[in-house]
Image (spheres, helix red, strand yellow):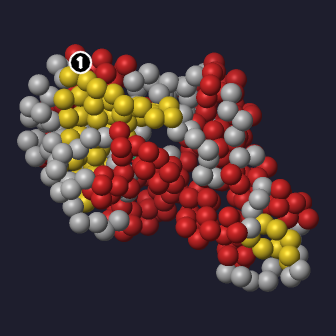
Amino acid sequence: MTTDFPWLETLQGAAAVDVAARCGLLSDLADGQKCPARPALLEHLLIGAGVTVREAHGLAFTAEFAAAWRADSAAIMARASFIRRAAADVAMGLDEMVFDLPAFMERSATFRLFRYDMAEGTTSEHLNATRPWVDYVEALSRSESPHLVPLINLREGDRILEIGGNTGLMSEALISTYKGVTSRVLDLPAVCALGRERRVVPGLEFCAGDARKPDALAPFDGLIDVVLFKSVLHDWPADDAENMLARAMGILSPGGRVIVCERGAYGPEDAGAKDANTLANMVFSRFYRDPLFYEDIMKRNGFAVTRKSVQLDMMFHATTGTCP
Ligand SMILES: C[S@@+](CC[C@H](N)C(=O)[O-])C[C@H]1O[C@@H](n2cnc3c(N)ncnc32)[C@H](O)[C@@H]1O
């Protein structure tokens, strides 16, 4: 798949976009403000990345970047910032990423961003700590969901429970594609609060909770046709992932489905990518699993399994288990 974010394909381009966003240059240019002279190096980098051109009156956005910025400036900023963090982690932390994963996670700038502990409350401090990584996750999901929705077959009126559904972007895409579908997103409290702020959609509901708790799914027992996990289970060690999946299967009636939509295992073809965007996946490379891992758990629970896949920034698989 060609990237939606060509300005971030080189590391120097991504870093320059992040710097220019943080110092206010990009929003000034977007507002059509005449900008004072900027350091020549930053201008060169932005021009080199295809973000700006030099015009008689000074710098201006290229037409392509202007359109992308208008469409989703938050996604551009979140991705640029994340690529910088990931690049620093890969450059300085590869030894630990390879030989001592817990030490890598402890020190890495990318893992420090995902403060799930700070998503357990809804004070302004909790929301401020949660917003930056939620912005990044939303940016990814906005690019992915048009390609992933066709892998997920729903029936009219299906009631979805999306576990770790973040601010509901994927659920919203499913609701708008399939007739009569409704969705409940179960996520941590701060994430649900941001979801309610950002996404008021008929048929979409946010339920704050902790999916690791043994009774977290009890309120949904018998009320759900499809349980969806998208890009969630790789976050968890094998035992936790298996427990969450088994509990999800436990609330389904015959014909109900559990769907795991995840990137596949990281391989040489992923490692060979020349686009800085893909550094963002590399920091999670040790966590992505072969879809057979999820398939085996479903089969052990007596579910019939099918799978559809699509190549995005990595291979994505939607593994569906149907309750007998
Ligand atoms: C990597 S993000 C993926 C989000 C979304 N599904 C997507 O693909 O864009 C993982 C999500 O799982 C949520 N999560 C993590 N731990 C959780 C828990 N114990 N209970 C419920 N949700 C959790 C996070 O808050 C986050 O929204």
Horizontal side of 148 relative to 106 (left or right) equals left
The residue drawn where x is 28% and y is 66% is: 201
Residue at (46% x, 35% y) in the render: 310
Name the quadrant of the C terminus: top left
- Going 44% across and 21% down the picture, which residue do you hit? 290
Is 297 rendered above or below residue 226? above
Asked if residue 170 shows in the view, the reply is: yes
Q: Residues within 10 Å of mark 1 (few under 14, many from 20)?
A: some
Identity of the amino acid at label 1? Lys
- Residue 192, percent across and down? 33, 58
> Along the line of sight, which residue is nearer the eye, 312 or 184?
312
Q: In front: 136, or 104? A: 136
Question: Residue 292 location, x and y as percent?
Answer: 37, 19
Residue located beneath label 1 in the image: 299
Q: Residue 159 location, x and y as percent?
A: 17, 49
Look at 74% across and 67% down and name the residue there: 62
Looking at the figure, which quarter contains the N terminus?
A: top right
Residue 210 appearing in the image: no
Rendered location of residue 181, percent (x, y): 20, 54
Which element type, helix, strand or loop, lies under badge 1?
helix
